[in-house]
Structure formats: C-alpha cells, structure tokens
Amino acid sequence: MKEIEIRIGRGARATRFAAVLVKSGSTATRSFERSRSGAGVQVHLTGERDYHVALVAEPAAADKALLRATVGQKLLLDFPGRRAVRQRLAGLAGHGLQDRSEPKAAALDLTAGIHGAAPLFLLSSGELAADADGPAPKDMSSLPVFVAAARWISSRRTSSFECLFPPSAFFPDEPLRTERLTPTQARALLRQVDGVLTEAAASGPNAAVDDAVQLRSAALTVLSHVVATVLKDPEFRAAADAAAERIFRLIDEETGPGGRGELRAHAISLLSLRGPALRPEQQARAQALLRSLSRQAPPYAALTGPWRFALASAPEFFPGEVELLQTKFGFTKVAAPEGTPASPNPWGDGYVVLRAPFVGKGGREFMVFARSAAPRDENFEMSQEFFTGLLVSRHANLGAYDMRASAIQTPQVGYKLMMNCQCAGLTTRFAIARMFPDADIFSSWDSTYFRTGEGDKVVASEGIDCFVAILRGLAEEEDFAAIDRRIRKAQWHHRQSRTPDFVQFIGPAHPLVVARYQDINRDGKADYYDGFLDFRLVEIAESLKDSAIPRDPGASPSQIGGEAARGLGWAAGSLNRVTQYSELWDSLPGQAELLYAFRAGGFFSGAEPPRDVPAGKGPRGELGRLPAVVRYVREPAGDALTADVLFHSHLSHSAQELKRLLVAAEAWWRAIDLGYLADTTPLDTPLGQRAGLLLLLAGLLEFPADQNFIDGLWEMALDMLHLPRLSRSLIRRCNSDEDHNDGNYYGSVRGIRELVGTAEAPGGVLKPANPEAYEELAAADPAIGRARPLGEVAQAAGP
C-alpha cells in the first residue's frame, strides 16, 4: 500500500495525518463501507477520483475532533512525488474514532535514581518543572529546569521522547518502562518552550541578562529532541513540524541585535543533523543555511596582488619537493621579492622562491616560498599578511607533531588557505581549526604517499601533486567543490577510493566529514553530535601527576573546556588513526576503520551518565563509574558505524596521553563485546584479546618524549586497566619493523602470536620472561584488562 498524507489547513499551521491508500476509483466507496466496523480510522474522500484511505496511527483526541469537524469540507491529499489534490472528506469510520481520554498521569521524575542529578519532572500536561507539583516556568526562572533538560537530552543518542526511560543493556533485569511524551503533551511543551524563548529573546527585555543565551541554547536542545522524535513516533509529525519552524525562527532572531553567532551556527547544525525528520521544504531551507556557514570559494574579489604560498617541509622532504616543483611542474627559481619576511629558521639562506609556469586571472602570479621547517615554527607564515597560504609537509608521528605545533600560539593575519600534507590529518583537524578558525583548511584523509630515490630524496609526492592541483583551481578562481574535483584527479590510489565521498584532502566543501571535527564551543564534543551548546565553560587544566586520581571538577560535564576538552578531542582523533593502522580493526562494519568513525562525545559523570550505550556480551556495570565510554551507533539506513568517545568528568584533568590510552582500551573492549572485531584466531580467546590490547597501548606510546615520562604513563594505564606489571620494552618489540612495513603500528595478528604464542605453541616471548603475568593474562577473570570503576583504581605514583 502507498503511504500518503492528509492535510487540513494551510502552511506551517496545517495538521497532517499519515495514511495509506486502501482503494481508489470506483471501488473506493464499497471498500470504505465494508470497513466501517474495522480497526483504526477509515477515511472516505471524494472528488474527481474517490479514495478510501486508512490513517497510519490513531490520532489524539483533539485531532479526532478536527477530523469530525472537517467532514463535508475540502482538504488536501498528498501523494509522494505529485502535487497535492483537493478532496472532500465524505466520511469517517472505524474503532479508532472512539474517544479514549488519555489517562491523567502523575508527574514523571526524569532523573530518578541518578545520584546527584538536578531535579527534572515532566508534568502530566507535558511541561517541564523542577518539582512534581509544578509550576512549569515560562520566564527567566526556567533556566535551571531547561538546562537540566538539555543535559538529560544530551546524554542520549538513539532514543528520544518516544521512550523517556530507554532500557539499559547493562541492567537487563530492570523492568521495562513504556512512558512517553504524547503528542498532546508535546503541544503543551512547545508552548512552554515558545514562552521561554520569547522571554530570553536576543531582542527581548532580558537580552542583556547573562542567562538569556544559555536559556535559548537549552530551549533549542529541547526543540531538536521533539523534531527527532517523529522518526520513532509518526504521531509527532505536527509537533516536529512546529518545533522545526521554531528553530528556523530562532536562527533568524540570532542574526539581529544581541544575537549570538555561535548559537545560530549550532541551531543550523542541529537542523542538518535532524534532516531525515524534516519535511522536504524544511530540508531545503536547512541545507541552504548549512552552506551559508562556510565559504563556498576563496574571497577572490578581496584578494589582490600575487598568490604567495609558503611550503614548510620537514628536512627530509624539503630538497626533493623543491626539485619536484621545478622538474615535474615547471616552476622556476627566482630572487625573493622585496618585502619578503625573514625566514624563522636561524640557519640557511632563507626561502627558496619559485614562480609557477601559470598565472591567475588578471595576470596574478603564483609564488612558492619554500623552507625547511619543524613543528615549533611550521605555522609561522600564518601570522604574516605577506602570504596567502601555507602547505605543511612532514610526517605526522602518530599525531604528536600536530599537537606540538598547535601548542605554539600563532595568530592568523589576513586570508589564509592552509594545506596539511601528512598521514591521517583529519585526526587532529580539530586542533588546527581551533588555532585558525578563519582559514580555509585542507586536511589529509588517508596517508599522504611519496616515493624516495637515491639518498632517500623524495622523487614523487602525492602532496605536491594535489598542492599544484589546488593552485591550478585558484588560478581559474574556482569554488571549493571544483577544486575538490581537481584533487580527486591528482590524488594517488587509496583503499578508500571506492567510497563516494573520498577525497585525499578534505577542504571546506566537504561537510560530511568536516562536521564531525568542528567544535563551536570547544567543550570536547564535536558539534555533529553535540546536543547542548553550553555557554558557561570552565577552563580545566590537565595535570600529569594527578592523572589517575578522580576529583570533582566543580562544573557540570557539559561545562568542561580548556586543556581537558582539547585532550579528549585528540584522544578521539587518535582512535581514527589506530583503526587505519592496525589490521586487528579491519572487520569494523561499513569499513569504519577507514572512514573516521570516532568523534569526541564530551564528558559525563555519575550524575549525568551516558544513555543508549549497547553492551554486547561483556560484563555489566555502572557506566557512570567508568573512566571512558565509547558508544557505537549503527546507522539505521545502512551498515555505517559511528562512535561517540566520552570521558568521565572526574578524570577530565588527566593528561591527554592517558586519556588516549583509556579511551582506546574502552573502544577495544566494546568493539569485541559487540562482535565488531573478528571472532577468529587470535582474538577468539581472552588471552589473545588482552595481548592485542597491550600492543595497542604500546603503539600509542610511541611518540618522542622522555622515556621515564612514557613509562610512568604505562604504569598508570596498567593499574587503571587491571593489567599485571609488564615490561613495555617487551611489548613494544612485538610491534616490529615487519608490522610497520605492513602498515600495522598498533597491533597485528603476527604481533599477538609473537607475544603470547598460539594454541599449538603457547607462551610466546611473554611466558619465559614473566610467567606470572602470562598466567594472569590467560585467566578466566573477565575483569582482567578492563577499566576499574572509579574509586577502585590502584593508585600509582605519577612519572
């Protein structure tokens, strides 16, 4: 049967009913008469052609009254892909028309049983309050209620108002609860939200009050949740439409006096995230707004003079890349023009200046200023108005160099186009974008390939090929979508090439991937996922010495910012690098190991624990006491997998290197528990799984730093993950050069077998070196290798 829609009224205020076509034409009347005593609501429509349709869901009492009042009058009948037709409502029938008064329910305690959670009640009317007896505030005093609601909503991922108390996979013995927000209650809730937004409006009487923007943001989160609910409950169609329209209004209001650009951008992001729940005309409006958030092309009209790009290459890349520009692409060496800034290098002869063999419109020359660079000075040219752009070409060193470079404060001066040519640059894009929010950035998706010849000089470079392709696009004053097409032609072959969205350098025209790495309010939660944009952030510094000691940060999880949030972003990005460079993750669904599935999901606490987290076959426990939680989400419309990386707020001060180890261990075990990692040798036994985890942890600690510092992190992680004392040197040797040559930096099947042996030849290198540790790793105790709940961590002295 075809699904259609009945529409009573006009425009955004129309009431809509989802229906299915039963019969049409000459048989419609007879079919309707036969169904008079049937189930549901049967509808007889007459006109140029007659129809018998049945409503998909039983309408609320008010909607039944509207249907009855419309009998004999005209309405609109919408068929997918066709224009609506006007029909007369000739008759109604079916048991679904019988009035069923919705039971008067007591107020629901939405945060019941969560120690320390702010009070939040859903009144029987559908409004929100801080007390079971009300009242439901609609003015500025509603701030605590709506912030509590926004945080309650943000803890969820796959459930909405259709299920107020989703079942926990970790406590299957708890009775199921079926309470939901009804469509009638949703209308009351929307009236409350509208009243709140009117009181807190950017142009309203309370615009100057600090709480106003926080309240608008919280109300936006509630509206977004109402929109999402229609995907699970079709009866929410009218409420979802009204909520979406109110979000559009808020977006318009935030452009005026007193408005906040970051709240407007967040509202647009939420609408795009809720796209499947929007009507087609609303989807088109949301897409247009989303496009408006980023430049579609460089500001050509505002740029004058030559195009000047700096090439900051690592010393091992510099000679070969300069030569490639000359021999392969015809660039010629010229003297440095007057006004060229001094190179930040204290050695050498300054820049090697090359002129391109092509010019842009108006005869604008393209000049490349090449120099040898290190992470400490590679961004220097971003602070010089003389330059239009910068290409950074070096090894990523597993992301460590990016983080080192981002720690050097370098203000952007003038327009800049920045290209990062390295391995898996998207994993640290968040840090680069935070440093240079106004730059047009191109980040690498996969490894950026190159070949070397005699003396290890670079003789071919994918990065240089794509760089010249970008310059060619700029010469023609193309938009970023056209430049993307040039990059696709210039890039080398990658495993991800069969993915429709793949382009080796992700630029401003690629929102599907980039959106996961934007973080408007810098709370360690990617805005692709962020439900609540908290404007009261607290800068939390990291402390290596106390990394393993839980402590109350004195702020709600959604308020944590500063170094703590930055470290979580790096930890989440590291997981994308791990899955690309270890064969042990190759079985992730939907090629997630190649598609940057992991993104920062922010912080949580015992009072605000994560919801909608699948458990799989692993041990049960309280999520609110784990150091980290990775919430894997299978997309409903396919095999794609995404993962939200969350971290306990009481460990938010932990060093970013320790955060990375803890979230990696959590991601590893939850993927195993859910059956996402291959259940074959050697991952088919606890010993093999624990050996794989050890190789992963050892690989993550391969970065340049004092070895005492790294060994201290190693000891902390072993304690917190219930692992025996083990020599890091022994483990890291099992991530061998052979593995590295095969692209396995974070564990391999070969490495596991070397470490602990096989079923036929058990022991490996570990058992002779440390038989007690081997026996502990092979033990049946399911807690071995898994994070201790907070409060049970065996404390170790910091490095």
Image (cartoon, rainbow, N blue to C red):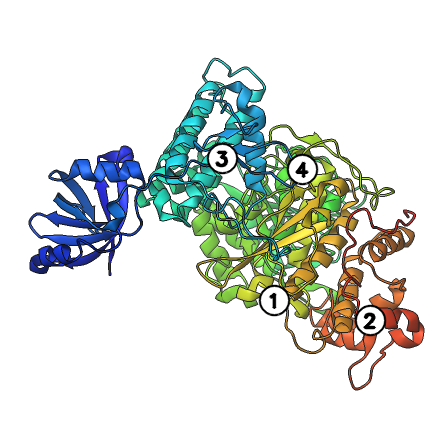
Instruction: Return the x and y of residue 515 as percentages of the image width and height.
Output: 53, 46
Front-lying residue, 653 or 191? 191
Q: Quick check: marks 2 and 1 in contact, CB under 8 Å?
A: no
Can you say which quadrant of the picture contains the N terminus? bottom left
What amino acid type should be assigned to the residue bearing mark 2? Ala
Instruction: Return the x and y of residue 520 as percentages of the image width and height.
Output: 58, 36
Nearer to us of marks 3 and 4 is 3
Q: Residue at x 47, y 23 (%)?
A: 196
Between the C-alphas of marks 2 and 1, the distance is: 23 Å
Nearer to us of marks 4 and 2 is 2
Between the C-alphas of marks 4 and 2, the distance is: 36 Å
The local secondary structure at tag 1 comes to loop
> Viewed as shown, does residue 168 lie left or right of 93?
right
Nearer to us of marks 2 and 3 is 3
N-terminal label among 4 and 2: 4
N-terminal label among 3 and 4: 3
N-terminal label among 1 and 4: 4
Residue 676: give its label. Answer: 1
State the residue position of label 3: 106
State the residue position of label 4: 557
